[in-house]
Amino acid sequence: MITLSSDFGSPYPAAMKGVVLQRTDARLVDVSHEFPRQDVRAAAFWLREILPYFPPATHLVVVDPGVGTDRAAVAVEAGEHVLVGPDNGVLLPAARALATQADAEAAAGDGTDAFAVHDIGYEDAESSTFHGRDVFAPAAAAVHDSWVDDGTVPNAVDGLGDVAPTDEFVDLELPEPKIEGDTIRGEVLVVDDFGNAITNVPGYVLEGLDEVRVDGQSVPAVETFAEVPEGQWLATVGSHGNVELDVNRGRGDDAFGVKASDSVRIEL
Amino acid sequence: MITLSSDFGSPYPAAMKGVVLQRTDARLVDVSHEFPRQDVRAAAFWLREILPYFPPATHLVVVDPGVGTDRAAVAVEAGEHVLVGPDNGVLLPAARALATQADAEAAAGDGTDAFAVHDIGYEDAESSTFHGRDVFAPAAAAVHDSWVDDGTVPNAVDGLGDVAPTDEFVDLELPEPKIEGDTIRGEVLVVDDFGNAITNVPGYVLEGLDEVRVDGQSVPAVETFAEVPEGQWLATVGSHGNVELDVNRGRGDDAFGVKASDSVRIEL
Amino acid sequence: MITLSSDFGSPYPAAMKGVVLQRTDARLVDVSHEFPRQDVRAAAFWLREILPYFPPATHLVVVDPGVGTDRAAVAVEAGEHVLVGPDNGVLLPAARALATQADAEAAAGDGTDAFAVHDIGYEDAESSTFHGRDVFAPAAAAVHDSWVDDGTVPNAVDGLGDVAPTDEFVDLELPEPKIEGDTIRGEVLVVDDFGNAITNVPGYVLEGLDEVRVDGQSVPAVETFAEVPEGQWLATVGSHGNVELDVNRGRGDDAFGVKASDSVRIEL
């Protein structure tokens, strides 16, 4: 199984699918092609939240503001999964989550969250414009087949170049909130299609509370949207375990006046 | 085969797909994840119009304004199909259509349109926020595998709870038009992506007519858009058999000033 | 494998998929359902650029401003591929590209780009409104199965009518630029989701140049977006080999004030 993720909208992902299907019979599953344009951090967040729900798979990810520069292409082994994409950090939060999950499932329980990064050479590729189609798609097909065959990343990809383990890669860690007593300085990581502003503040802080202050305003802390009237704002714990700023049947981002990367102060 | 329908946009459906694929090898087919947000009636209409075109399948549907409340989860047997979703009526118009279709195909012809509803307990599920991923996706996978194996809904779903037949469920019938002589008081059920306003008025009323009055305005009644000049409004019979208010290469909803749930008066 | 392309948005493509899956077990792959509404030329361009990346397949295409008129339905053989859609030219540029590709792969190298068109009768179909579902979907399923079985287009499609070779079909050629010395009069073929204005001007004209004039304005000619600062406009060679008018992390169509079908003058 190969999952596909990008910020391409339509129809560019179809060219990637064609290339993949030229090279492998793998099942294809779209994660999203509507990630916020060139927003590596937003894509990294969504992938971290979504990919651990998948069975073992190869995950092709192309959110790549550096396309056309000489940034590397990488394959990242993580548990029974392997991720393929640009070396800009977008794969790393998901790789850590998948490695930690595998670790937990193996009952090793030592929290090593080990993953392994491989550099995918692509000096033989022709295109400098559409690496999704001309570099990452053939790489993902080759990695998938090798991974399914014997659980390894291949030593080379036909038409691209050699593949080799590397310790040099761009890492990315999503920002952590600062918790000082009852005051938390966090950040909006992404706004979803519903307008829910998803923060980096862990959900447990709302436990037992009926109300918090968000940027100075009093806001009900609830378990479900339906606990407040339509149109009223609220803070709740989202499906990813973080504090979300929402509006029942409305848009939280508008009501709270926040967007991705904005800081937010929560007082308990 | 499992079809997936929701009002989630992107990327939440991917988490549902991951959960389903953890549990079954079934083929997945997206119906739509762009149903109007939290509009149970619109989704019910589209499912009724679309699902009968599918071969026997399990249909996972999550349009669920009541998520987080204690509304039930249900599986509905209908002909060779089975539907899984929230107990808010969204499955029922499609279930009736599928049952009627099966009935017709079996040449029984008695119009019983029988379907059977099962309550899916989910007291063992952990999430109160994202039932699509944590309740309906695992339920659909389990229902699919049981349905394919022996044509029954399972007695329980691992990690959720017991499943049992029930007579207590939320029903939904799409509104019927009032036809009094030559005056019909109907309603716009949905507006599609093209801006076509699809009413609940049966198409046969237009038979033999060149013109009708819609909310007092004279409008050509045509078989195809191309019968009127670009930009002109028209009434026609849509692909679902109902009267549609359209504009040739334009948006009918704007031209007629209507949206879903608006009433509309048609004089023949 | 059957690929699906349309300008339907959502959820109408699902009805087509249901009909196809009633009739065949073929793998389905969406190319796009977001092609610009009723824009035959834009769809023809995208299909020509994308379909050659696919392995041998049946390509179902429904961009069909003439739906409901008596325009024909056609199947077009091209290399190892076959295309099914309305007789309005939308299939032809892709058919030529696929035939040329097959020719090149066969090392025949005589550039014949031969393709063969078949008329698909549909006098037995019931619908005059939704040919995608009621004509093209069953036709594509039947063509696919016959094509896979013995490499031929069938003589008839159940429920539609007879299929026969024809020399009478609507052709479409994308416009060619006029190159006179250093002045090129071209045209914007499509604007993609990123706002890149893709012209019909072949990319080789930019070779060795640092700058060109576009409609009288001086614009850097670059290999990759990253060569200019964010927000600056540029001309480059896109992934399809044509000159694109872009903005680094912005919209080229807005910056250059162009849309599909607009003419553009490039001075080298």
Image: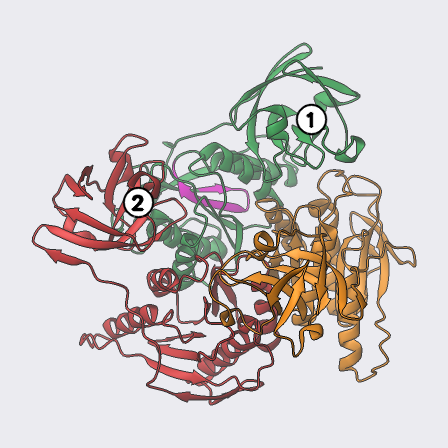
Chain colours: A orange, B red, C green
Residue A50 in sight: no
Q: Is residue C180 above or below residue B191?
A: above
Residue furthest toward the left?
Answer: B181
Residue at the (58%, 85%) spot, across then down: B159
Which span of residues is magenta-colored?
C76-87
Residue C203, numbered circle: 1
Q: Position of residue A242 (x, y in %)?
A: 68, 68
The chain holding disc 2 is C
Residue furthest to the right in view is: A167
What is the crowding at mark 1: few (fewer than 14 residues within 10 Å), some, or many (at least 20)? Answer: some
For the residue carrying disc 2, how many other residues have a C-alpha within 10 Å: few (<14), some (14-19), or many (20+)?
Answer: many
Question: Is residue B107 one of those drawn in magenta?
Answer: no
B126 on left or right of B208? right
Mark 2: which amino acid? Gly
Q: Disc 2 to disc 1, how far (Cα)?
A: 41 Å
User: In terms of image quadrants, where is residue C47?
Assistant: top right
Give yes or no for residue C86 being in the magenta stretch.
yes
Which subunit holds the residue at mark 1? C
Q: Main secondary structure of the magenta part?
A: strand
Which label was assigned to residue C121?
A: 2
